[in-house]
Amino acid sequence: MILASIANRMMSGRFVELDGESIPVRRTSSHWLRTVASRSCSDVVGDLQRCVRKADDAVSTIRSLPDQLERVGHALTAKDLAKLLQVSEVTIYKFAKGNKLPSFRIGSAVRFDPRIVAEWLRRV
């Protein structure tokens, strides 16, 4: 039970791989315990240590959205920006038209400079 609660806290919403089987951590602890009970303690501890290392690696590579935007080397379309901000394209166009979101035009196409959008996100 202790191993299940530790894993739930460390890997909430993730999958743990045991003997090649991916197990959602949010499953009931009885499922976890049945799986773990058939294994030696050192195997379980080793698996948990690997999970913790993977989680630490994932967390260390996560960057804030403005940091991610600054690494983009080209102008963004409304579709690209909408996907990053998890809003609709219509919202992006409305913000750009109302000068609430920095943008520029190339002919009739609306584009967004990722560095300027990153600065705007930090201010907002």
Image (cartoon, helix red, strand yellow):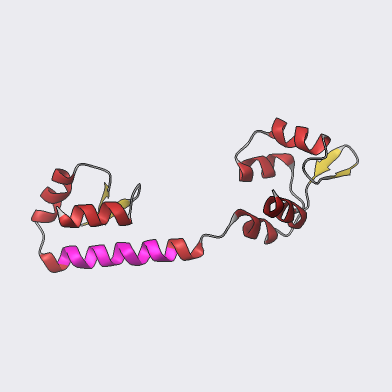
Question: What is the total number of numbered labels drawn onto the structure image?
Answer: 0
Viewer-closest of 2 and 107: 2
Left/right of residue 36 with respect to residue 83 in the rendered view: left
Viewer-closest of 107 and 20: 107
Left/right of residue 78 with respect to residue 110 in the rendered view: left
Viewer-closest of 28 and 40: 28
Residue farthest to the right?
A: 107
Residue farthest to the front?
A: 123
Can you give x and y, in whole percent of width and height, for residue 112 in the image? 78, 48
Whether 44 is among the magenta residues is yes
Identify which residue is drawn at 91% across, 40% down.
Answer: 107
82 above or below 36?
Answer: above
Q: Which residues are magenta?
A: 43-57
Can you give x and y, in whole percent of width and height, for residue 88 in the image? 65, 33
Viewer-closest of 4 and 44: 4
Left/right of residue 14 with respect to residue 21 in the rendered view: right
Residue 20 in view in this figure:
no
Can you give x and y, in whole percent of width and height, for residue 104 in the image? 85, 46
Can you give x and y, in whole percent of width and height, for residue 96 in the image? 79, 38
Identify which residue is drawn at 17% across, 49% down.
Answer: 32
Whether 123 is among the magenta residues is no
Residue 59 in which image quadrant:
bottom left
Residue 119 in which image quadrant:
bottom right
Identify which residue is drawn at 27% across, 48% down.
Answer: 25
Identify which residue is drawn at 13% across, 55% down.
Answer: 36
Residue 73 in view in this figure:
yes
